[in-house]
Image (cartoon, helix red, strand yellow):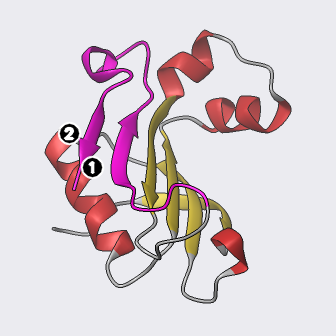
Amino acid sequence: MESVNYTSLRRWKPDNNPRGFGVELLLEEHLSKEEIISFVKELSVGRAPVVIKIYSTREAYQEELTNSYTAEYDRGFLVFYVKNTTGSGPYAGCNEIRWMQAEGKFADLFGQKTRF
C-alpha cells in the first residue's frame, strides 16, 4: 500500500509489553474500507499486543479524551483495532477491527467486526 498521510496523536505499549504497539492516529486523507484494513495490517505486522484507534477529526479524539461525546465523535471515530495473539491479558486471541463511525462514510459498518 502506498504511504498514508496521518498524524500520530498518542503512542504507548499495551500491557507494558515491549513488543506491544498502541497508537491513536488522525487520518489526513479519506481512505476506503479496504485501504483502512491494509493500513492497519501494515502497522500491526510482527507486533502483539496491538491497539490502534483511528480518527478522521482531532475534535473526535479530544472528545474521547474528555468523555464528552457529541455528533462529532460519532462522525470522527472511525475504527478500533485490537490484536492480542500473546495468549494472555485483555482481548486474548483477538485480531479484529471494530467499526466505530456511527455517522458518515462507514456508518453502514457501525458495530461490525472485521476479523483477520
Judge whether residue 70 can be spotted in this image.
Answer: yes
**Residue 97 covered by magenta stretch:** yes
Q: Which element type, helix, strand or loop, lies under badge 1?
A: helix
- Residue 64 percent location from the top left of the image: 72, 34
Q: Label 2 crowding class (10 Å Cα cut-off): few <14, some 14-19, many 20+?
A: few
Picture quadrant where residue 58 is located: top right
Give the SS element for disc 2: helix
**Residue placed farthest to the right in the image?**
66
Answer above or below: position of 73 versus 34.
above
Q: Which residue corresponds to the image point at 38% horizontal and 23% vertical from the top-left?
A: 111
Which residue is denoted by mark 2 in the rendering?
A: 33
In the image, farthest residue toward the front: 87
Residue drawn at point x = 54 percent, y = 87 percent: 19
Q: Are marks 2 and 1 in contact (CB under 8 Å)?
A: yes
**At 80% across and 20% down in the image, what residue appears?**
68
Please check the rendered image and state whether residue 103 is part of the magenta-colored stretch, yes or no: yes
Q: Quadrant of residue 102?
A: top left
User: In the picture, which quadrant includes the C terminus?
Assistant: bottom left
Q: Farthest residue in the bottom direction?
A: 18
Q: Residues within 10 Å of mark 1 (few under 14, many from 20)?
A: some
Q: Please identify the quadrant where the N terminus is shown.
A: bottom left
Image vertical order of residue 63 relative to residue 93, above or below = above
Q: Quadrant of residue 112?
A: top left
Question: Range of the magenta residues?
Answer: 90-116
Q: CA distance from mark 2 to mark 1?
A: 5 Å
Q: Is residue 37 above or below residue 2?
A: above
- On the image, the x and y values in percent for residue 22 come to 59, 66
Give amino acid for label 1: Ile
* Amino acid found under the numbered disc labelled 2: Lys
Task: Tell me the residue that label 1 is attached to.
Answer: 36
Percent x, y for residue 105? Answer: 29, 21
Residue 57 vs residue 96: left or right?
Answer: right
